[in-house]
Amino acid sequence: MPSLAVVGGGWAGLAAAVHGVSAGHRVTLFEMAPQLGGRAREVPLGGLPLDNGQHILIGAYTATLALMRQVGVDTDTALQRLPLVLSDARGHGLHLRPGRPAPAFAAAVLRHPSWAWRDKLSLLGAAGRWAVQGFRCDPALDVATLCRGLGAAVRGDLIDPLCVAALNTPAPEASASVFLRVLRDALFSGPGAADLLLPRCSLGALLPEPAGRWLGQAGASLRLAQRVQGLAPHGGGWRVDGEAFDRVVLATPPREAARLSAPIDAAWAETARAMRYEPIVTVYLRCDGARLPFPMVALQEGPDAPAQFVFDRGRLGGPAGLLAFVVSGAQAWVERGADATLAATQAQARRELGACLAGPLEVVKLIVEKRATFRCTPALQRPALRIAPGLHAAGDHVEGPYPATLEGAVRSAALAVHAFG
């Protein structure tokens, strides 16, 4: 039985470990933090099961869903499945009905109450052209340029928030080719592909905790709070801090991967080190009696309005009245500081949620993930899966067609393990 070291206990590392066990490896997982989960984890606060961010899954995330089921998660219970809705608190927005995503999308566009007919037809024409072209475009193209012919209302209500939600990069700086891949998988992958899958439990309960239990029961060794100091080739395999393994999957964030890989492949390490990041800010507010019309409500981002979406955690199995406001592409707000971000988010909440708020807004927690995702820019060079013989990389940043998503992380891990042969 070959031995496999997995360095990193985020979703990519957990996926690599599970796939490694399933492929017949003797697995040891190293994680520098005292808990599993990486950048999608639970952050408890005074008994509240808060998460470090609001992670959305969609029906097209087949690899992630399969991994959850493999480790014993009842995805029908853990995730609330809804047809894609991008709506404000008044119910105005894009509402897809159940069925095949492409016809449902076209019908939702035609029903949109706020768009002029010329804007609706322009969007449907553009979507048709993208489909005919196989959802491919010049890798150097950005999303704003790709959608330049669409009306301002369509760009502001749909393209811009969808882009920053999926790629965590503003449309003028975001890769159009990656954006189109996301649209392709959501709209042309069969019934349910575009459905929103919203966690009804903490992120810890969604995968890290059950995966940790599954790995322990399968005989894998989990070494938490242990930061790997170095990798070195050893015969036909590798040493991880002096311990011999046949194969290694490096499933850490790019900077940590660059540190560990630099003595082995300086060019690979430099590619990883050159990646740039975009923060995400989550603002938790509580309002007694608050209940939103949908579990996820779209907000109008602007110079004094940080958040693009708000989640009603009370409608998703959490405490009633707990609201999570998400600020993606948040660098400007990180620079303005926590106090300014909190004040602007509270004002935005009162302005846009209005009648949904029955009382005062209480600040619960502001969480900043400064390196939440890589900046998904046009023609971005991403680190390759293979670093050296027997040493592969995994993570949402590794070369592939997806942006920094849970699905990208999980798929890269499966590829990294199975590429060993």
Image (spheres, rainbow, N blue to C red):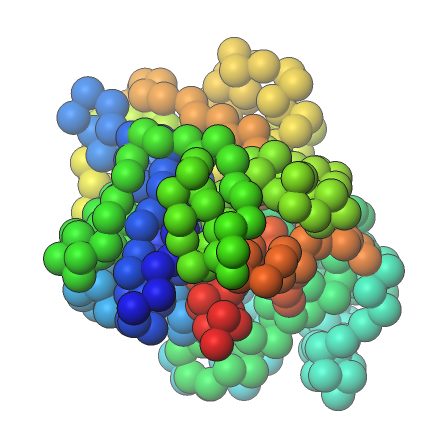
> Does the image show residue 336?
yes
| Quadrant into which the N terminus falls | bottom left
User: In the rendered view, does 304 fall on the left or right side of 12?
Assistant: right
Q: Can you give x and y, in whole percent of width and height, for residue 159 in the image?
A: 67, 58
Residue 8 placed where, x, y %? Answer: 42, 44
Q: Residue at x 24, y 69 (%)?
A: 70
Q: Relative to 252, say whether 198 is above or below.
A: below
Residue in the foreground of this view, choosing between 395 and 300: 395
**Could you tell whether 242 is left or right of 154 in the image?**
left
Q: State whether residue 411 is above or below residue 239.
A: below
User: Residue at horizontal 32%, vertical 21%?
Assistant: 364
Q: Residue 258: give x, y in percent of width and height.
A: 63, 39
Is residue 105 or residue 385 the one in the foreground?
385
Compared to 282, does 117 lie above or below?
below
Q: Could you tell me how many numbered marks the image carries? A: 0
Seen as rendered, the residue at the extreme front is 235
Q: In the picture provided, is 119 more to the left or to the right than 340? A: right
Examine the image and state in which quarter residue 81 appears. bottom left
Name the one closer to the observer, 5 or 159: 5
Query: Is residue 279 depicted above or below 126 in this figure?
Result: above
Residue 237 in the image, given as x and y percentages of width and height: 49, 57
* Residue depicted at 31% across the width and 50% down the height: 28
